[in-house]
Structures are given as structure tokens and as C-alpha cells.
Amino acid sequence: MTERLYYTDPFVRSFDATVVRAEHQSGTAGTARTRDGRTIVTLDRSAFYPTSGGQPFDVGTLAGHQVVDVVDNEDDGSVGHVIEGDAPLTVGQSVHGEIDWPRRFDHMQQHSGQHVLSAAFVRLFDVRTVSFHLSADASTIDLAREVTAGEIAAAERAANDVVWEDRPVHVSFVSKEEALKLPLRKESAREGTLRLIDIDRWDLSACGGTHVPRTGIIGVIAIASWERFKGGQRVEFLCGARALRRFGAMRDVVTAGSRLLSVLPHEVPPAIERLLAEAKDQRRASTQLKSELARYQAEDLVSSAEPSASGHLVLRAIDADANTLKALASAVTAKPGLVAVLISTSKPALAVVARSADVSVSAQQVLAGLVAKFGGRGGGKPELAQGGGLDGEPADILADAKARVGGHS
């Protein structure tokens, strides 16, 4: 069993210990397991926290080697330190460990903040936390039921009151039987001795994680977002330095938006609403203008229509995008007796084939023939089809289309 120094003093940043199990890839006697080409070292005592209870593991160095993972061996209560590469450590060797303190301190702020926030939801609204996850950027708790925006705001206020009152956080150890007599926020499924985290007059929970000694060290608890999740609510929150970084990012965004819109920060939302409304009106006006322009252009195209076995044929290469080609073809074939084949002057070419309601030519079949000969892809209906990626000269594509349309009866 490994003596876990963080159980009683989470502020231990460095320590000395003895290797009790340490194997290398050679697999010699007395050496420890390797995982993915890395050495796993077990010590008699350690300040490294292994992944457990929603809190990630610590990283740092051991005898100068990078510790990239820490695992909890529940079989014998030992802590395994996964070291990058084949570390030449032997059983009985004395080693010095260093914790990545900024990472550890961040985890302490977030985990203690979670206890305070979860207790707030229980105390105010009798809503329990069913799971907790701490990631590199944010933390989440999953609540047993959906909560309102007002309830979330109230829990956030109550949690920060506890933070700012700088209440002491005590650590104690009790048996499972003793724990059953205590008002724990959540019953623990663990057997044997339990480690309790007691936030003065606020929360009592069984937990093996690292925590701050006073709530004031949490700094602040800020709820960033929430969403429905598995019949309940997932709440994202940030504590301490994380909240400060998120505030800084939001401040920079609002400042930039204010400058671009030439408004004060609190005027950004209505300014954006005005821009969206204006853009919508402009899109509507643009659509109407394009439709009118298409009608005028269609008149010019119709005037140049050539007679064919299937009706008058409009063939044209135009410098336009797919939507414009489609609008023009539709405007042309709104008149009776017409077939339109329009392609873009760009390469590879776009193509639109359309026919009037009284013409029997299948636009879909004509386009399929063009695609088969010139490549690309496309599809549509008998009255209108469109495609792209045709590889050929405009004159050649239009000539082939003319032959295909002329062949229909």
C-alpha cells in the first residue's frame, strides 16, 4: 500500500520516497510492469494523485523523469506512476518527486468548488449531483433533474457566499459504520475507512480528491452554461483562475465587438439584432432584384433561341454561379416550348438543363449524358437538372447538349 501524502496535506509539492516496485522493459526480476512502452513505478509514499472520482491525475517528475499518468491499484491500495520511456529505477532506490503545482492547485480549486456548488443545489432545491467531471478547460456536474435559470442563479449566489466567507475545510477519517451515522450529502459505496471532506456548516462528503483548506482559496464559482442531459441538467462551471481566464476571453470579445459596432458594451446585443434585421431585408431585396434581372436576361436568351426537334433551344455559356444559372434557366422555361442548357464559363463547368412544361425532353437524361461524357456529377428531375465538375470546352459541351436535345421527339 502506498502512503498518500495528499490525503492529509494537498499542498505538498515535493517529496522523497523509496521504490517498492519498478520494472523496465527488459522484464528482469524485481522490475515492474510497462504500459505502452512506459515504465510503471510504485513507491512507498507519494504526493501524486491518481485519476479518481472525476478528478484527473497529477503530472510532474520522479527522479528527473516525466510522470505522464498516475493509476490507482485498488487491489493492494498502491499508486502506480507511469513514466515516459524506460526509466532506470530499481527496487529500494530513493527518489525525489515534484508535482506540477499549477495543475494540482487548479484541480483543488475546481474540486472544492464542485463540493460547494453541489451542496448549494441540494440545500436550496433538493437536487442531487449524480456525476462530476473535471477537464482541462472546464468542469461539469450532472444534476438529477432539470433546473430553471433562476434556480441556477440562486445556487451560484449561495455557493459564492460560502466561498467569500472563507470557511475552513476539514479532513477526517471514519469507518463505514461511523459514516452511516453522519449527515453525508451522498452515501459512499466504498468499504473500509472513508476520508471525509467537511466544509464548515455547508457540506460533508466522502471523497479521496485534493481540496483547498479554506473556501476562500476557491476564489469564485462561475456557472458558464447548462443544457439538458439524460433527463437532468448538465451544468458547466469554472472556479478561480479558470473563471478569470474565461472572463478575460469574454471581455476581449465584447471589447472587439463594441469597437467594430461603435457602441458601448451593453449595446452590443441590440446592435447585432439590428444588423441581422438589416441583413435579412437586404437579402430579400437582393433576391427580388436578382429575380427581376433574371427575367430581363431571360428575354434576351429567348430571343436567341434556336429551333430543334424538341422545341426552341437556348444554349449559352455564362459567367455565373449555380444559383444564377438555375434562376435564368427557370425564367427562360417559364415560357412555353423552350429547352435551356446553360453552363458556366469557369472550369470545371457547372451545368443547368431545364425545359418548359409542354416539352417532353427529360432535363435529367440530358444532364446524365453530359456527365457521362465530360465527367462530374449531378442530378435532378425531368423538368430541371443541375450538375458540376464537367471537364470540357464550353462550345463542345453545348454542341453535345444540342445533339442530345435534338435527338428527342
Image (tube, rainbow, N blue to C red):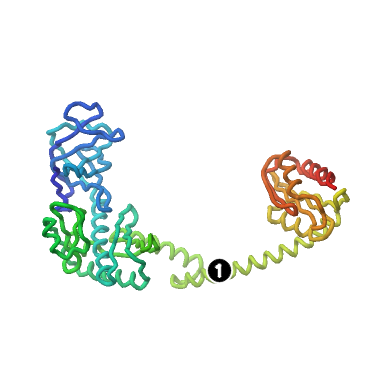
Quick one: 189 or 366, which is closer to the camera? Answer: 189
From the viewer's perspective, is residue 164 above or below residue 350? below
Residue ID at (31%, 35%): 36
Kind of residue sitting beneath label 1: Leu
* Residue 61 percent coordinates (x, y): 22, 41
- Tell me if residue 8 can be seen: no
* Residue 283 sits in quarter: bottom right
* Residue 161 sits in quarter: bottom left
- Tell me if residue 171 can be seen: yes
Position of 383 with respect to 50 (left or right) is right
- Quarter of the image where the N terminus is located: top left
From the viewer's perspective, is residue 374 above or below residue 259? above
* Residue 248 sits in quarter: bottom left
Q: Secondary structure at mark 1?
A: helix
Residue ID at (23%, 56%): 108
Residue designated by label 1: 275
Residue ID at (17%, 47%): 47
* Residue 313 percent coordinates (x, y): 84, 51
From the viewer's perspective, is residue 169 above or below residue 84? below
Query: 10 Å neighbourhood of mark 1: few (<14), some, or many (≥20)?
Result: few
